Structure formats: C-alpha cells, structure tokens
Image (cartoon, rainbow, N blue to C red):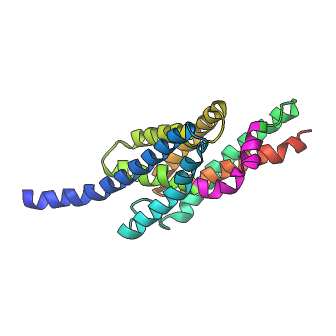
Amino acid sequence: MRTTFAPAQSAQVGPAGRQLKLAIGLIAAIWVAGLAGHFTPLGEWPALFIYVLGSVAAITAYCRRYDAWAQVWISRTGLARALAWGGAVGGALMLIDLANTWVYYHNGGAPLAEMEQLLVGMRLAYLFPLLVLAEEWLWRGLLFTALLGLGVNRHLVVLLTTALYMVNHYAVAPVPLGERTLMAIMALPIGLLGGYLVLRTRSAWAGVALHMLTMISMLVDVFVLPALAR
C-alpha cells in the first residue's frame, strides 16, 4: 500500500508545490526590487516592470512547459460563465462607484488630481489591460490554485491572496505613501469578490472581468464625470 500511495501523493502535491515556488519567487523579486528602488533614483519602476511583464511572461512559460493552463485556471474551460459572473458583479460595482463619484463631484468635490497624475502624467493608463491580466494571473491564478492544491482552506486562500495583493501596492505603485494606501484599500473588494468569483467559476477570468470593469470605472471617474457633474 505504501508503494502505491506515495507516488499518487507526490503526483498530486508536486504541481501545486512548483506553482507555489514560482509564485513566491515572483513576489519576492517584486518586493525586493520595490524596496531597492525606494532608495535609488529608479524608484518603483523596476518592481512594476517585473510585476507586469515578468508575471505574464513567467506564468505563460510555466503553463506552456507543464501544460498547466487548466491547473492555474486560466484556460478556456468555463470562460463564458466566468466572464458572465465577473461582468455582472463588476458591472454592479461600477454603477455604485460611478453614482458615488457623481454625487461627490456634484456637491463640489475637487477633481482627483493625484489619480489623474498617476494615469496621465505617468502614462499608467496604457498599462491597465496588461496590469489587470498580470495581477489576476498571479494572485487569483498561480498563487490561488497552488494554495488550494496544497489543501489550504478556501476561505483562507481568499483572505491570504487578498492581503498579499493589497500589500503589494506598496512595492509597485510609483506614488506617495498616501496614494499607495488608498490603492491598497481599493484592492480589498477586488481581492475578496474576485477571489470568491474565481472559486465559484474555477476560472481566473472571472477576476479579470471584475477587475477590468473597476479599472474602466476609475477612468470614467477621472476623465468623464467631472464634466458631467458640473
């Protein structure tokens, strides 16, 4: 019985262990680069580069090597259902955000100058599609499924990946501390709702759809609503 049980257990745990190593390696590289950049003229840009391009490249290479697209929950399996769920929840969040922001501007609220500087002055608006893909593949794809595969409680997986996702904004956001904190707080509902949507659909694409709609909402907040609320 030992001879048959050990290989089966190894085959089950092995892929999840490989995923976890890759996820931890990526996160460590991002955070070390962010910390080093904080004390150099380079700032957080190297960490952001690793986070966006490095994550997508590394996860793509991993999935191609081990044919792990389904294992990491970024295959086409259940894609339509995942996009429908993510779109529905993301659309509801978008409407709530737009309504609140319109009331804010309509009552004399000041334009979101810091966010406009981040999106326009630093040209980060162009990175949003790739940034969303990188974040969801890393936090709600690679790390998420690795922890589940190792037997971690699913609710703890949602909480842990959300917490790390929030903290990560302090390593990669090239903005003052106050704006980083605001971004980390904004990441809380994305992480929690996205995590449970991914659990329900078993697809990271549900998180991508939700996240993308929140980013579109942010762009409308900055560039469209100020004029409409006058």
Q: Is residue 215 above or below residue 100?
A: below
* Residue 55 picture location, percent across and down: 49, 56
Single out the residue that lies furthest toward the right: 230
In front here: 15 or 34?
Answer: 34
Residue displayed at 26% across by 55% down: 13
* Residue 87 picture location, percent across and down: 63, 55
In the displayed structure, does residue 72 sit left or right of residue 113? left
Q: Quadrant of the C terminus?
A: top right
In front here: 151 or 21?
Answer: 21
Single out the residue that lies furthest toward the front: 41
Kindly report the secondary structure that dominates the magenta region of the rendered protein: helix
Residue 173 falls in image quadrant: top right
* Residue 17 picture location, percent across and down: 30, 53
In the displayed structure, does residue 125 sit left or right of residue 184? right
Residue displayed at 89% across by 44% down: 227
Residue 5 falls in image quadrant: bottom left
Question: Taking the image as drawn, is residue 69 in sight?
Answer: no
The number of numbered badges drawn on the structure is 0
Q: Quadrant of the N terminus?
A: bottom left
Q: Which residues are magenta?
A: 114-132
